[in-house]
């Protein structure tokens, strides 16, 4: 990126999307590397918890209503996006990236 550019990495919680990204905080949100200003705050929704909760609820409502109407199994079978969002199922880790992640120290 050219000097003076600004990189906003909203994927930093999942490892980031720029080679030069590293997690920052709300207290110290930016750093400059190679002349590029980086904003890589983890958990950005924490800045606006009320709004974030409303947005998450609105996004999830259609999935919950569908599961209530059709049942969990049918909903997961018929909706790949929903099935891909399941982390734990039947007491087992279902999401491959979680299942294969190194154990926390």
Image: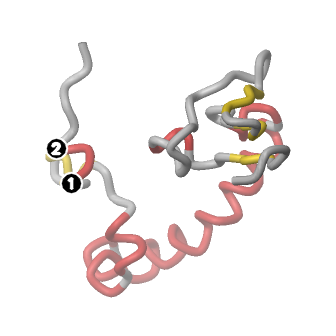
What is the image's colouring? secondary structure
Q: Tell me the tag on residue 10.
A: none
Q: Quadrant of the C terminus?
A: top left
Q: Is residue 30 above or below residue 99?
A: above
Quarter where residue 58 is shown:
bottom right
**Nearest to the observer: residue 12 or residue 97:** 12
Task: State the residue position of label 1.
Answer: 96
Q: Residues within 10 Å of mark 2 (few under 14, many from 20)?
A: few
Left or right relative to 93: residue 59: right
Q: Is residue 71 left or right of residue 65?
A: left
Report helix, strand or loop for mark 1.
Answer: helix
Answer with the quarter of the image where residue 103 lies. Answer: top left
In the image, 32 versus 14, the foreground residue is 32
Q: Are marks 1 and 2 in contact (CB under 8 Å)?
A: yes
Q: From the viewer's perspective, is 60 left or right of 67?
A: right
Tell me which residue sits at (72%, 40%) in the image: 45
Residue 1 percent across, percent down from the top left:
69, 53
Residue 85 position, x and y percent, is: 39, 61
């Amino acid at each position: 990126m050219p000097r003076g550019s600004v990189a906003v990495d909203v994927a930093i919680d999942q490892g980031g999307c720029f080679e030069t990204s590293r997690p920052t905080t709300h207290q110290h949100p930016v750093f400059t590397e190679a002349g590029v200003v980086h904003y890589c705050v983890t958990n950005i929704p924490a800045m606006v918890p009320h709004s974030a909760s409303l947005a998450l609820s609105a996004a999830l409502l259609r999935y919950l209503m569908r599961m209530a109407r059709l049942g969990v199994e049918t909903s997961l079978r018929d909706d790949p996006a929903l099935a891909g969002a399941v982390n734990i199922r039947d007491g087992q880790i279902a999401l491959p990236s979680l299942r294969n992640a190194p154990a926390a120290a």
